[in-house]
Image (cartoon, rainbow, N blue to C red):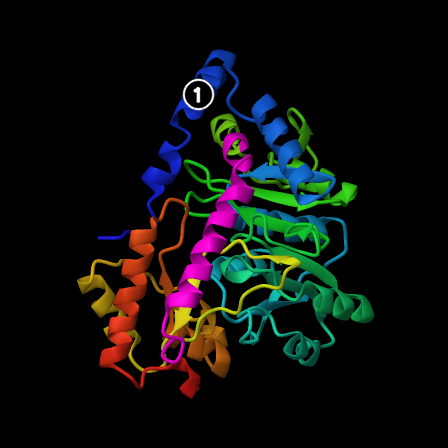
Amino acid sequence: MIPFLDLQALNQRFEDEFQTAFKRVLAGGWFIQGDECRAFEADFASYCGVEQAIGVGNGLDALVLILRALLEVGRLQTGDEVLVPGNTFIATALAVSACGLRIRLVEPELSRYNLDPQEVESAIGQRTRVILAVHLYGRLADMTALAEIAQRHGLLLLEDAAQAHGASFGGRKAGAWGLAAGFSLFPGKPLGALGDGGVVTTSDAELATVMRSLQNYGSTIKYQHDRKGANSRLDELQAAFLRIKLKHLDADNQARHEISLRYRQGLDRSQFEVPDMPAEIEVHAWHLYVVRNANNRAALQEHLARAGVQTLIHYPTPIHRQAAYGELAGLSLPVTEMLSEQVLSLPIYPGLSAHQIDRVIDACNSFAAIHPNSSAREH
């Protein structure tokens, strides 16, 4: 079986460096918010091209801390509305809900599966205060257009960059487009820890100060608590591991890009809708390689499993169809709903061999030969 993601092989590449880092942290005897975390924060901020990065407990916390900080400093008020893409992982919405803000789901465009700027423009209402752009599957949303809309309407532009470590447009990386951005460092992400973790990026000094307080029980001075904070801190061992992996992130993203080229060239594109390729000035992190099949996704997934190819579906149930968001059940989001019914994610990660890539392509194309009317282009 070709695994959807081989985390063991991915991390074994750095085993010797991990062992050295582990011994260094163990010998140092300091395990929370020490030199390793500060060094990773500095490295990641420099990599993204921003002033500050703040290591936190996970990607959801990263988004919550951004929104809570904006509430603390008065740039947002409880009940303000946040525009969120309909097709995203539920964590994007949960962060908004956790902060007492209102969610308004917005349809994506089909070239990138990210927020459609025209739909964003149409969705702006009297209480709208934030555009929360998600760089889904590792590709930047149309941040140039969204930034122009945000500026024209006096809105805050934030990034959910959980899947887009290293993605860029015109040399400007994910995490450097909005007022602040939240990244997940979950093991399966392009830059993944060996446990859970997250990081916030921003060049806003006031927000950074407030977020550092909020993540540490509302305190900047021990036993002095100025805010009702939380406990969300990236530990020293994960930070040490991440510093090692960050050095290889661009090479890993390039490896994923080369696999995407092989898929695009080899897959029967009369039967599968494949991702558009980025322009020369754009870098796609290729966290996921998602194809669309209009009528037979379940059969396709079963066929690939029988052929020894593991696949996943991201995400089979949209936010407005989840029980947790029953209040949104009346929404009609046809593009979001179509994607939830049609998308299938193929293996894409560094170390996937040419033979394995060919097996994936052959398995897909053999299904297309059996089901010639399965193209997503029908929709």
Q: Residue at x 77, y 45 (%)?
A: 204
Left or right for 159, reference 184: right
Q: Residue at x 29, y 72 (%)?
A: 365
Q: Residue at x 38, y 27 (%)?
A: 15
Q: Residue at x 36, y 61 (%)?
A: 346
Does 61 sit above or below residue 275?
above
| Total numbered circles | 1
Q: Is residue 333 visible?
A: no
Label 1 element class:
helix
> Residue 24's spot in the image, x, y percent?
49, 16
Q: Quadrant of residue 140?
A: bottom right
Q: Is residue 175 visible?
A: yes
Callout 1 crowding tier (Cα within 10 Å): few <14, some 14–19, many ≥20: some
Q: Which residue is mark 1?
A: 22
> Residue 234's spot in the image, x, y percent?
53, 34
Left or right for 53, reference 2: right
Does 22 sit above or below residue 67?
above
> Residue 330's spot in the image, x, y percent?
48, 82
> Residue 290's spot in the image, x, y percent?
42, 65
Q: Taken as a whole, is the magenta stretch helix, strand or loop?
A: helix
Magenta range is 243-272
